[in-house]
Each structure stands twice: as C-alpha cells, then as structure tokens.
Image: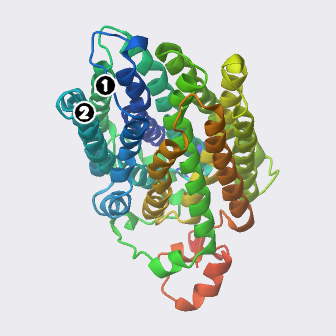
C-alpha cells in the first residue's frame, strides 16, 4: 500500500500538533513572564503601602536598593544563556524547558518568606536564582520552533509563540496591582505566579514533544510535511552537527543581528521595569491605576503583533518584497517609531497623563513588530544552530537589561523629576535608532553557508563575511539540497 505523503501546506492538516507546540510555547512565555515582570509592580506595593492593602508589611527601601532588586534577575539570566544552547542540543527542549518553569514556581512561592527575614537583599538573591533558571528558556523556545516550524508556517508559529511575552507582560502589569489591592496583598502576586507556572508544567509533560518524529500525538501526514518541508532526512534528529564557531564569530550578519537584539533588550528593560516607577513618580498615579495603565502598552503590543503578522503573510503571498526587505521594513517601523514617541513622552507631566499613556501605548504597539522583524531572522539564517545562536544573542543582549535599572537608579535620583526621566527616554531612543540602522545595512535573512551540515571549509570565509545565501542545488527527490 502506498502511503500518502503530506508535501505541501494544502495537503497537510490545517491545524495540527505543530500548532499545539506553539500554544505550549506561548503559555510557557506567559507563565514565566508573569513571574519575571510582576516585581516592578510588587516593589511599588511593598514600598508604598498607602496605595495598596495596608495589612501587609511596608519596606523603606531607597531608590538604589529598588534598582538592585529590579536588575538582579538579569545577573543570573545572562549566565545560563550560553549553557542553555548546549543543554537543549543535548537533551531537547522538553526536558530543559520544564526545569526553569518548575523552579520559577518554587521560587515564586518562597519569595514572601524570604523577604520577611532578609529584606531587599534576600529578594535580590532569589531573583538572581530565578534568573539563572529562566536563562534556559529562550534558547529552548527557538530550538523548539526550529524543529516544529516549516518555512511556510514560521512567521505564524513564531509570532504567536513570542506574543506570549506581550500577553505575559499585560497579565503581570494588570493583575499585580489588583492582587496587591486584594485580601492577598502583595504576597499574593508571587503565589499566583507560582500556581500558573505549576499548571503549565503539567501541560508540558503531557503534551510537549522534542520534535515531530518523537510525538505520540502527531499524524503521519503532518509529520512528513514538517520533516520534508525542511529537507530533513530520517536520521536528522539523531545527528550532532558541529557548531562552526569561527564562522559564526566572523559573520557580519550575525553581528548585525546581535546589535539589533541588544538594542531591543535595552528598550524592553526600560519599558517593562521602569514604566510603573515613571507613572507613580512623574504622573502621580496610585498603585491600582498604575498597574492597569502600565498594562496598556503591552496589550497594544499583543494585539499589534498579529497585525504585523497579517501584513507579513499578505506581503509574502503577493510577493511585494523579499523576506529580508520585509523583516527590515517591519523592524524599522517597530524601532524608529518608538524612538520618536519616547522623546515626546519625556516632555509630559502629571497634567498630561492621558497623552503620556497614549504615547506609551503607541510606542509599545509599534514595537510589537520586533519579533517578526528580527527574532525570527535567527531561524532564517541558521535553522541547524538556532538554539545556540539564540543563546548567544539573548545572553549578550540581556547584559543591557541588567545595567539599565542600575543606570536609571543613578540618573533618576528623584522619581518625580521629569527632566531626569527625559534623559532615560532620550538614551533609549538613541539606542533604538542606531541598533536598527546597523540591521538595515548589514542584516539578512539568507541562510548562511556555515549552517550547512557538511560545512568544514575555511575557504568559505569570504562568503561568510559577505553574508551570501547558500547555493541551492537540485536533490534526487525533486526538492533542494544545501550545498
């Protein structure tokens, strides 16, 4: 009997296990982002009990001490990025991604007890440990997407999975203030986070799979479509392809990608961690409305990420532009638009609260295109080494979120000073502008020569430096073969 092989999207199940994996990745990011970002609202609640439930302890922490708490997560986060690339290649995403989420659940549950006896120092230490575990997450996410996302579905699955960051940010900002104001008080923020992470762990153990061949839920037609669309042979998932370190570190497109993602890391830390402090200090908003309005920009990001996705699908299906041009165009809108908005925000005060919130929302909404604009470029350039590249890019890029809260703590000595916040926003706008400019000039989505399974020749170095696309030769099965 001849087996039907699913070779194209039209003959493959419209909704399949590859979409389930994207949903699980989406939920993983949501759960971990809630636990990561609720600290920005929790710190305000813990240090200003008058704006929340007064039945719980209030702490007299200085601005510098609060900055240490906000930045401490990233001290641990950057350390495990690089090891995560090796771990996910060795053990697969299912095992490695479970560990940080389960650890986050435990650490979140312990946080109120640690603070009660150790204050801001204990809080900082537990955040460092949490960062160590969460550093494993995004290399796993990228590796899992590379294994499950055929090129035709990559934008959809990738954007949906990464939109979990926006959803998690919304839920962290919106719910944290409400929880702190409820009978649970600020400790409830951490208990709720622990419960959400725990539920995800159960779903992942039951439904997650490292790749299509190892899934017990997938049908043969969808499995063949995923494998063949990415030109993978039956033994691919058992292979250990050597990492071309020298080629990667001499690749100009790789450095362009590294710079543009580092710029995004700087901006994200400013928006995610400093927004509640800006609203509380300059706009003089109470903790409940502060948290709700702080969530609006991330709600805009969440919604706009799908608007960008629809545009990208239409642009590619109608061949309006190449993939490289598409990604650079979307990334330009998502970087230079917010750069202009940030300059405007710095000139507003408490009498212009509505305009400030509007600009912050527009800023975030435009920035939602950074996912489809540059994150997925990693898989485009190197599907075979996407997990390791994500580990490098995310590890170096997150040095800046580690430093920016400390820098803000030095610049903003008076939380109510508009002129000091102007400096913070202007610096972020400059980083946005130049980061994207580098990406426009030297970035590319072309699959790199060093991504080939048989890449061994140093003579290819000139091709690497120029970022040339891999030559595609006809294969025996009628597809294409990487040369």
Q: Position of residue 430 (x, y in %)?
A: 69, 52
In front of the other: 95 or 17: 95
At horizontal 31% and vertical 20% (from top left) the residue drawn is: 58
Furthest-bottom residue in this view: 459
Residue 54: tell me if it is visible.
Answer: yes
Q: Quadrant of residue 417?
A: top right
Q: Residues within 10 Å of mark 1 (few under 14, many from 20)?
A: some
Q: Position of residue 69 (x, y in %)?
A: 36, 39
Q: Position of residue 26 (x, y in %)?
A: 46, 36
Q: Secondary structure at mark 1?
A: loop
At horizontal 70% and vertical 44% (from top left) the residue drawn is: 334
Quadrant containing the C terminus in the rendered view:
bottom right
Name the disc covering residue 244, or none. none
At horizontal 44% and vertical 66% (from top left) the residue drawn is: 233
Q: Does residue 189 appear to the left or right of 380 in the view shown?
A: left
In the rendered image of this protein, does residue 252 appear above or below residue 263? below
Please give the residue where the numbered disc 1 appears in the rendered image: 59
In the rendered image of this protein, does residue 82 appear above or below residue 188? below
Q: Does residue 299 appear to the left or right of 84 in the view shown?
A: right
Residue 136: tell me if it is visible.
Answer: no
Furthest-right residue in this view: 320
In the rendered structure, are the residues bearing label 1 and label 2 in contact, judged by CB atoms less than 8 Å apart? yes
How is this picture coloured? rainbow
Name the disc covering residue 119, or none. 2
At horizontal 37% and vertical 15% (from top left) the residue drawn is: 49
Q: Give the alpha-carbon distance from disc 1 to disc 2, as whole Å.
A: 8 Å
Q: Secondary structure at mark 2?
A: helix
Q: Earlier in the sequence, mark 1 or mark 2?
A: 1
Q: Position of residue 432 (x, y in %)?
A: 67, 51
In the rendered image of this protein, does residue 214 appear above or below residue 468? above
In front of the other: 63 or 87: 63
């Amino acid at each position: 009997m001849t087996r039907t092989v699913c070779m194209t999207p039209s003959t493959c199940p419209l909704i399949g296990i590859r979409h389930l994996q994207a949903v699980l990745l989406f939920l993983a990011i949501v759960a971990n982002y809630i636990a990561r970002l609720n600290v920005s609202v929790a710190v305000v609640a813990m240090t200003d009990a008058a704006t929340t439930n007064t039945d719980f302890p209030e702490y007299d922490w200085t601005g510098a001490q609060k900055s240490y708490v906000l930045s401490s997560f990233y001290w641990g986060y950057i350390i495990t990025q690089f090891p995560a690339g090796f771990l996910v290649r060795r053990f697969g995403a299912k095992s490695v991604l479970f560990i940080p989420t389960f650890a986050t659940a435990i650490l979140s549950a312990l946080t109120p007890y640690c603070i009660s006896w150790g204050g801001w120092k204990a809080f900082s230490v537990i955040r460092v440990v949490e960062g160590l575990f969460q550093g494993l997450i995004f290399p796993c996410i990228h590796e899992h997407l590379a294994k499950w996302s055929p090129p035709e579905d990559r934008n959809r699955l990738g954007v949906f999975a990464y939109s979990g960051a926006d959803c998690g940010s919304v839920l962290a900002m919106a719910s944290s203030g409400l929880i702190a104001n409820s009978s649970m008080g600020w400790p409830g923020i951490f208990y709720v986070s622990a419960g959400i992470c725990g539920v995800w762990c159960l779903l992942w153990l039951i439904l997650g799979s490292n790749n299509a061949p190892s899934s017990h839920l997938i049908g043969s037609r969808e499995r063949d479509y995923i494998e063949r669309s990415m030109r993978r042979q039956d033994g691919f998932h058992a292979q250990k392809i050597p990492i071309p370190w020298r080629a990667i570190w001499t690749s100009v497109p790789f450095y362009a990608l590294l710079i543009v993602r580092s710029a995004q890391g700087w901006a994200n830390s400013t928006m995610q961690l400093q927004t509640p402090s800006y609203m509380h200090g300059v706009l003089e908003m109470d903790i409940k409305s502060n948290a709700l309005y702080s969530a609006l920009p991330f709600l805009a990001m969440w919604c706009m990420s799908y608007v960008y996705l629809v545009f990208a699908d239409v642009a590619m299906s109608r061949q309006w532009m190449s993939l490289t041009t598409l990604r650079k165009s979307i990334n330009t809108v998502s970087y230079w638009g917010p750069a202009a908005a940030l300059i405007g925000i710095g000139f507003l005060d408490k009498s212009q609260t509505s305009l400030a919130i509007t600009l912050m929302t527009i800023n975030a909404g435009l920035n939602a295109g950074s996912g489809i604009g540059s994150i997925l470029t990693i898989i485009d350039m190197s599907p075979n080494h996407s997990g390791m590249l994500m580990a490098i890019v995310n590890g170096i890029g997150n040095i800046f979120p580690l430093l920016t809260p400390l820098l803000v703590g030095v610049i903003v000595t008076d939380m109510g000073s508009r002129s000091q916040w102007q400096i913070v926003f202007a610096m972020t706008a400059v980083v946005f502008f130049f980061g994207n400019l580098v990406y426009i000039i030297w970035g590319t989505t072309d699959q790199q020569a060093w991504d080939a399974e048989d890449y061994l020749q140093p003579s290819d170095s000139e091709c690497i430096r120029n970022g040339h696309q891999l030559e595609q030769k006809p294969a025996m099965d009628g597809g294409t073969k990487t040369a």
